[in-house]
Amino acid sequence: MIPMSNELTRHIMQIVGEPAGGIRRHVHSIIFGLRGIPDLKQSYVCSASGGDAGFRKDLPELTEALDGRLLNLNIGKKPALSDISNLLRLARYVKEQNVSMIHGHGAKGGAYARLLAGLCGIKAVYTPHGGAVHKMFGWAEDKLYTAAEKLFFGFTDYFLFESSYTAEAYFAKVGKKPKNWTINYNGIPFPDTAVIHRESQAFGYAPGTGGSLNIGVFGILRPQKGQLYAIKAAAELVSRGIKVKLHIYGKGPDKAALESEVSRLGLAGTVIFHGEVDNPESHMSVMDIILIPSLFEAFGYVAVEAFALKKPVIASAAGGLREILTDGETGLLIQPQNSAAIATAVETFIKDPDKSRLLAARGYEKFLADFTLCRMLENLSGIYRELSR
């Protein structure tokens, strides 16, 4: 828990669209990290039907921590008539519950937060996350969302970015830079090694078992996460005579296409789809290498989680990953969409295990220095405290 003075605003509302992946991890870290502080209440608005396994696992604790202030709304990614009724409902809630600050996360959560803040005359904090800066939509949709970001710009009291990459991409998108903004890297708690060890014992595999190298890829199954290139890299490694098991964790719209590629390459016994898991750290602990083949990444929670578990990391030199990893010092960076480069990086760790261990140790030091949950919450609480004045 982060101690704060009574200057802190009394009631903060966190808003996100679908609580899944890194954005869910970030918001839940804030809610759990700030609970128990005197004179501070929090509310949480999200579209629970789009929540991932982590959301469902956290739900009992969220319910207890928020004491009934968890509002489940149907918040779609695209503009819809339901947004009007949602905003009217939330405006009443803000007034009735004396909400004094709204923190919006992601493009849709940010839109809600700033519209509500303008309607209700309170402060708005906005964290864009990846969807607001990546080219994930068609031309027409991208134009629409960019216009919305420009419109809401003036309704934002403070911009809070996960990485320098996200900040720079956002400034380029809207064509200007705000006065009140900062970068606050996401942080994670120290791994619960006892729980991780207990859970991992039930998996039936461990680093180096069966004569194969275990490589783990964690993320939503969609093109931007680059699982396709991990699969092609596995085929390349097999062709080089290297025994590997590629473990893919997550669910998403790209699953059928990925399974088809595995079948086409004859990798049925090499690539394993585990689906969505609610204990990714435990699965990560039994990997020899953590691979992050993303095409875009606003931050890169998986890299930080791997650092905390002292695992060697191979990642694309994309987005915020370039700020987390330093090539040859805390991990190996490869160009996005390059399966041959992934295979060569894996070979580097195989041929030089001392280097693998050294980079993993330095990654852990980087975690301690820059990516702990305590550091993130201290910075965030200072921003909330300053705005509340």
Image (tube, rainbow, N blue to C red):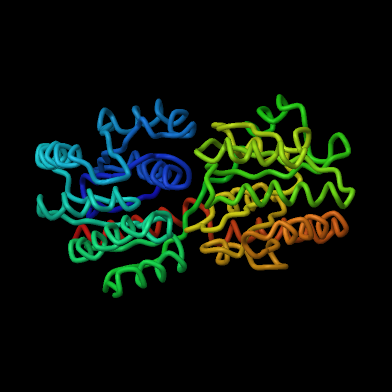
Q: Residue at x 28, y 69 (%)?
A: 180
Residue 360 lies in quadrant:
bottom right
Q: Residue 348, located in which quarter of the rendered image?
A: bottom right
Q: Nearer the viewer, residue 207 or 7?
A: 207
Q: Is residue 58 visible?
A: yes
Within the image, what quadrant is residue 380 found in?
bottom left
Q: Indicate the quadrant containing the C terminus: top left, top right, bottom left or bottom right.
A: bottom left
Instruction: Tell whether 243 sits left or right of 116.
Output: right
**Image point 52% across, 62% down: which residue?**
320
Which residue is more in the foreground, 58 or 263?
Answer: 263
| Image x and y of residue 281, in percent | 61, 39
Please state if 356 lies on the left or on the right of 124 as rendered.
right
275 or 161: which is nearer to us?
Answer: 275
Note whether 28 is above or below 274 in the view shown. below
Question: Which of 27/362 is in front?
Answer: 27
Q: Position of residue 304 (x, y in %)?
A: 58, 53
Residue 373 appears left or right of 40: right
Is residue 44 visible to the viewer in this orientation of the structure? no
Decide: is 137 above or below 190.
below
Residue depicted at 28% across the width and 56% down the height: 384
Which residue is drawn at the image coordinates 21% and 46% (left, top)? Answer: 10
> As displayed, is residue 6 above or below residue 154?
above
Q: Position of residue 238 (x, y in %)?
A: 83, 46
Q: Is residue 345 above or below residue 220?
A: below
In the rendered view of the protein, which quadrant contains the N terminus? top left
